[in-house]
Amino acid sequence: MKYTYEWIEHTSSTMDEAKIWAEKNASTAEKVPHFIQAGLQSIGRGKAGRNWVSKKGNFFSTLILHFPHSLDKRGQISFVTGVSVVRALREFKKNLPVKLKWPNDFYVEGKKLGGILLEFHDYGQPYLCIAVGINFVSNPAHVSSTHLKKLGLDLDLHLFRRVFLKNLLEDYKTWVDNGFSKIKNSWISNSLHKDSMVSISLGKRKYVGEFHTISDVGELVLKNEDGKSIVFSTGEVFFE
């Protein structure tokens, strides 16, 4: 699948740039994915509007994808993207122990390496914006995190972009043509939660159980001590 590409040296965030691009090009753009990559972000953001520390040398990007699919399918793209990131990183370091934390983070040795953020816009054409941030050369000190250089992997930002995008567009086509099953199985095989006891915080309530699987729409399925399955479409995941 072809795509167009834009490098921006310094921006507030690639998600901000993606929103501007989608609004400006919705009426005239061909349905070709557009990829925005930045050297530096001043106001990067993560899930729930949290600040994303965005120091120079790390990987900041957003793919703008024409997305004529139903609302319930949008969340599955986080899993498609996670699988693609893992595949790309292991092309550069085969045994890199990178794992996927539900629903949108990358971890290595129990420390956060990066994450995914999805936003949807409709300006006459429906667009899904898929942001990926990965710590290449530095990581924030205020959270348990790591970076690739510390793990012995010194990656070129542009080379990684080409490999990652190739994988993502391939995996997206697999998802479109064959549904979620293959992506789901690949995600589970690389899951940080596999065979683990985890807790889910949802508002003021906390649920504890064994990670069982993810559902056919990407929900997390826990089994509690009574063997009952509990399904979550959102929530904060912690390890017991």
Image: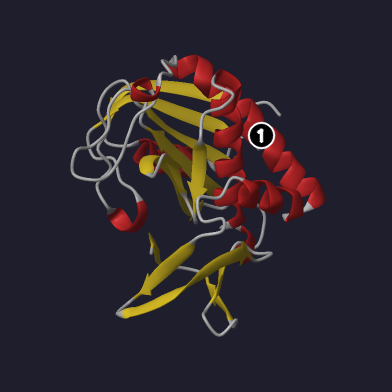
Q: In the image, residue 165 lies at what x, y percent? A: 59, 28
Q: Classify residue 208 as left or right of residue 177.
A: left
Residue at the image point whose x is 30% and y is 46% from the top: 45
Residue at the image point whose x is 46% and y is 52% from the top: 119
In this view, the residue farthest toward the right is 178
The correct choice, above or below, for 206 with respect to 117 in the image is below
Q: Quadrant of residue 200?
A: bottom left
Q: In the image, residue 48 lies at what x, y percent? A: 33, 58
Residue 66 visible in rendering? no
Q: In the image, residue 52 lies at what x, y percent? A: 28, 42
Q: Classify residue 142 as left or right of residue 196.
A: left
Residue at the image point whose x is 51% and y is 29% from the top: 96
Task: Count the labels in the image.
Answer: 1
Quarter in which the C terminus is drawn:
bottom left
The foreground one among 179 and 6 is 179
The correct choice, above or below, for 98 with respect to 203 in the image is above
Identify the residue under disc 1: 169
